Image (cartoon, rainbow, N blue to C red):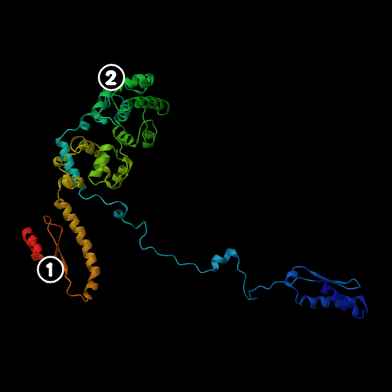
Amino acid sequence: MSGVKNFGDRCVDALPLSSSSSSSSYVSSFASSASTSTVPSSTTSVPVALTSPSGAVAKIAPKRKRSSRSSGDLPISNSHTADLLPKPEKRSRSCSSSSRSDSQKRPREPEGWMDAWTLIEEMRSQTEAPVDVVGCEMLGDQSAEPAVFRFQTLVALMLSSQTKDETTAAAMQRLREYGLTVDRVRETSEQRIKELIYGVGFHNRKAEYIKRTADLLAEQHQGDIPRTLRGLVSLPGVGPKMAHLCMQCAWKETVGIGVDVHVHRISGLLGWTRKAKNPEDTRAQLEAWLPRERWRPINKLLVGLGQTVCTSQRPRCADCLAAPYCPTGRRNLRLSKPPSLRSTSASASASASSSTSGSNKSSSASSPLTSSPTFSLVASSASSPPLKVKMESTSNDHQSSATDEQTPHQKKKARNQ
């Protein structure tokens, strides 16, 4: 930088200075010519000043960096970049969610469930189970006020958890004789309630729940039970199964399936649920395919079956009319599928085989292998197996069939030879 400045001073001193105007014009012309000269990149951002003895000062502006864009190009702002760029085409979906059929949304119903339901109803009509006599819906005093009857039904459901129906009915009889109302329970000590319900499972904990529930009903629900599933579940000691059954028995409203240990276990044995982890999982699977008008009777139907025939310890599959439609019953008794299930599976297999044969028809026609055996599917009647496979055998196949017709003794003799 100092070299450029001294060079300019020497040039100015060497010229004859006639007037200040001529010197200033010369300095300005020299400054314009010096601005076009090559300056190191490290000094382009610093302005250079040339001075003369007369005091005239000329500033050299820093060199501007030229843009790589030509003068004809237009600046593109970030806000309009998306508008100028080509937009990708929208993909057209072949099958939208709104166009899906109901069969795709709802899970498939278990095969033969209607036949099994009908046969279970027939068995239940012939045999009386404890749930038919002393079920929770029958333990309340129906002649009392509606609010009192609903409270008694709720207490009966709370006592029935992990307790036999006969024991629950005996405890409810003692409570009703003592006085089973919200106000009466609030006046009674917890110890007295324990004595009245002694014999039911976890009677100490249930006495505490009944006492707290009576206080909550009096303070928050005007002495009546809630009419919503969420309100019932919020009460101490009331789970989803009790809430669903209470809505059915006390309020005569069905908002879901009440699943207890019998419904949870037998639904899995019948193949109506798949790998259900808990009663709530069973309820969700059943509600997904079971018609809504059957949500209420399924509890009493399967509970009675579990109490009489399909017990947890030793299920009597030989006495069960629905055993042919039950995967567990067929396995235990070594039964084959009934004709109705075979015809259903035959139609499904026939449709699947027709689609695969149509896809393989062109490839088999162009195949050079003519000595390989060909297969033909023949539909069968309802009493015969679903599909028969006929095979045009070769000479090797005749030998194998002749070997199959030999008796075990002849086969052993041939192996020894």
Q: Which residue is located at x 18 percent, y 35 percent?
A: 308
Instruction: Count residues near mark 1 (Cα–Cα under 10 Å), then give few for <14, some for 14-19, many for 20+.
Output: few
Instruction: Count residues near mark 2 (Cα–Cα under 10 Å), then give few for <14, some for 14-19, many for 20+.
Output: few
Element carrying mark 1: helix
Q: Whole-percent x and y of residue 90?
A: 44, 65
Tell which of 283 and 102 is nearer to you: 283
Mark yes or no: residue 393 visible: no
Q: Is residue 175 toward the left or the right of residue 34 in the image?
A: left
Compared to residue 11, the image places residue 218 above or below, namely above
Compared to residue 57, the image places residue 207 above or below, namely above
Q: Residue furthest front?
A: 417
Task: Quickly name the residue at label 2.
Answer: 177
Q: Whole-percent x and y of residue 325?
A: 18, 47
Numbered label attached to residue 136:
none
| Picture quarter with the N terminus | bottom right
The image quadrant that residue 18 belongs to is bottom right
Element carrying mark 2: helix
The image quadrant that residue 57 belongs to is bottom right
Task: Quickly name the residue at label 1.
Answer: 397
Tell which of 369 and 74 is nearer to you: 369
Mark 2 or 1, which is nearer the eye?
1
Tell which of 97 and 59 is nearer to you: 59
